[in-house]
Image (cartoon, rainbow, N blue to C red):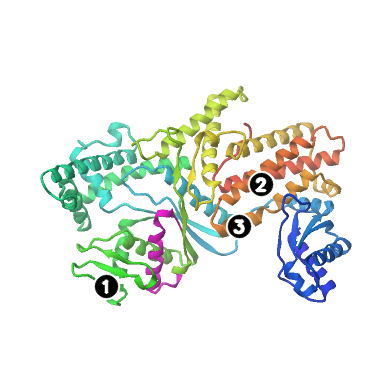
Amino acid sequence: MNLDLQLRSSIRSAVSALFQVQYDQLQLQPTNAEFEGSHTLVCFPITKISKKSPEQTATAIGEYLVAHSGIVSRFNVVKGFLNLVIADKVWAEVFQSIYADKNFGALPSNGRELMVEYSSPNTNKPLHLGHLRNNFLGYSVAEIYAALGYTVHKVQIINDRGIHICKSMAAWQLFGNNETPASNGLKGDKLVGKYYVEFDKNYKAQIKDLVGKGMSEGEAEKQAPIMKMAVDMLQKWEAKDEATLQLWKTMNGWVYEGFNETYKRMGVDFEKLYYESNTYLLGKEEVLRGLEQGVFFKKEDGSVWVDLTSDGLDQKVLLRADGTSVYMTQDIGTAILRFRDFPKIEGQVYTVGNEQEYHFKVLFLILKKLGYSWAEKCYHLSYGMVDLPTGKMKSREGTVVDADDLMQEMADEAEKQTRELGKIEEATDAQIKELSEIIGLGALKFFLLKVDPKKRMMFDPNESIQLQGHTGPFIQYTHARIRAIIRKAEIMGVQPSEKELTQIAVLEAAEREVIFMVNNYINKLNEAARDYSPAVVANFAFDLAKGYNHFYQTIPIFNEDDQIKLKFRIAFSQVVADVLKKSMKLLGIAVPEKM
């Protein structure tokens, strides 16, 4: 039963009967919490055809609906807002249709395709806290669109070439003594990251030494021996020097093994990987084509640029004077290659931090100037930085919070609290470890996803792990509580049937509120997809869990003598548990059966 469609149809009939006009531009919204009702009709626009005041118009429509619709039981008017109270029997019918729909919350294929890019790391250092928000956002957006019937292609571009990669390579050659992940037991991405830090330390020392000898700082930055070594490596790499390529492949291989281990723990996956080392060549071809066509221009030093000043932006370099490419070059090639690989996609979603907003404005504009109409279908899912309270988490390098360390500390804290609460004495150590992983990672993901992506946020590990409050563990605990209720009902032999549920005619207020929320699930998914915001789903799940807990605290379940009501409340609980599980799954979060 689609209540919204039926209600809109009834309202249109009321307007037509009362004012002899067909009117389809209805503004229907959720009722403000301080007033009775679930749906509110905004009547101000209708006064143009009713020729009455907003209050008179609302009252007339409300009276008609109560008398003729069979949906509305009563109403109240606040100025020009008509607050509608849906009849209990209608809410019961809505619930019955949800309970009978075993695929509720997952729409069939709509034949549409979308691509979502996320993670997209550099192969010169391990993943960090920012990557966690990035991966969780991109993965969740992809899952939300998939639930709405889209075929979603999850991809990442691995920035595996460039001067930053050569910095790690140069430092390893100078100071590595043939160290490998196998020889020291360090994850490959962390080993390579160690030498990236080593490069920076030595680079700064060399600059200081050259400046002390009378060289300007700008010249010292160029002439520092370790930097010249890295630049030489980049040129050799692009010239396909065999020794340089072999070192590059070896060190990147270490990094990929480390990344894969981290991704597995994060719970994210990818359908296809793109590598900058492949896509930058296509980007260079496109830049040269654009140069021939007059879209770009060449400066005296041989570098190639695009002039976007007439578009309110500035000039942007696309190829350096030495012929090497920049980030923009490979992004041009990557975008084109993806539309060639997946010609049916309606667009690409780039999950990248808000510090790159200008970069993507330039990228999309360049693609448009190159003649690619699909450039307008590209979207930058921009997100804010994540801050941590001082001293809350360890940092591997003093400035960057390592993703592996943070996930481990969340699991450790979850285990500590689980053992302190002592609710699972019969569980084995392995089961406690598994549960702690679910709770710790769930707390981390939920806290990072519950905030609108565009906002900068403060991640408080201690707050995120609490069983009470706006947290993932609160929702996980609610699900576990409901599953305990279902198990008890099964032991008692209480088995709801669809036929018996049709006998429910009167509902408690807490039941109506929860059914309203559950019925709004698909609307929330559509809202989340439209705004590319998993926060909509996260907050829906929290509100639903909170609504169920209010029901649980105010309405007895197993003390109910009426068997029809008892079975209804068991079915009601089952539906809530299922929707909570589906909602959390879209966020990449598991919910335990026991907790």
Residue carrying label 1? 297
Residue, far right:
67
Q: How many marks?
A: 3
Vertically, is 49 above or below 412? below
Indicate left or right for 253 with 528 as reference. Answer: left
Label 1 and label 2: CA atoms lie apart by 56 Å
| Three-letter residue code for mark 2 | Val
| Three-letter residue code for mark 3 | Glu
Label 1 and label 3: CA atoms lie apart by 43 Å
Label 2 or label 3, whichever comes before in sequence order: 3
Residue 268 seen in this snapshot: no
Residue 126 position in % (x across, y down): 36, 42
**Classed neighbour count for the residue bearing mark 1: other residues with Cα under 10 Å, few (<14), some (14–19), many (≥20):** some
**Classed neighbour count for the residue bearing mark 3: other residues with Cα under 10 Å, few (<14), some (14–19), many (≥20):** some
Label 2 and label 3: CA atoms lie apart by 17 Å
Vertically, is 593 above or below 245? above
Label 1 element class: strand
Residue 177 seen in this snapshot: yes
Residue carrying label 2? 579
Label 1 or label 3, whichever comes before in sequence order: 1
Label 2 element class: helix
Residue positioned 81% across, 55% down in the render? 86
Residue 276 position in % (x across, y down): 33, 56
Indicate left or right for 162 with 112 as reference. Answer: left
Foreground mark, 2 or 3? 3
Region rendered in magenta = 350-374
Asked whether the beta carbons under mark 1 and mark 3 sit within 8 Å of each other, the answer is no
Quadrant of the rendering where the N terminus is positioned = bottom right
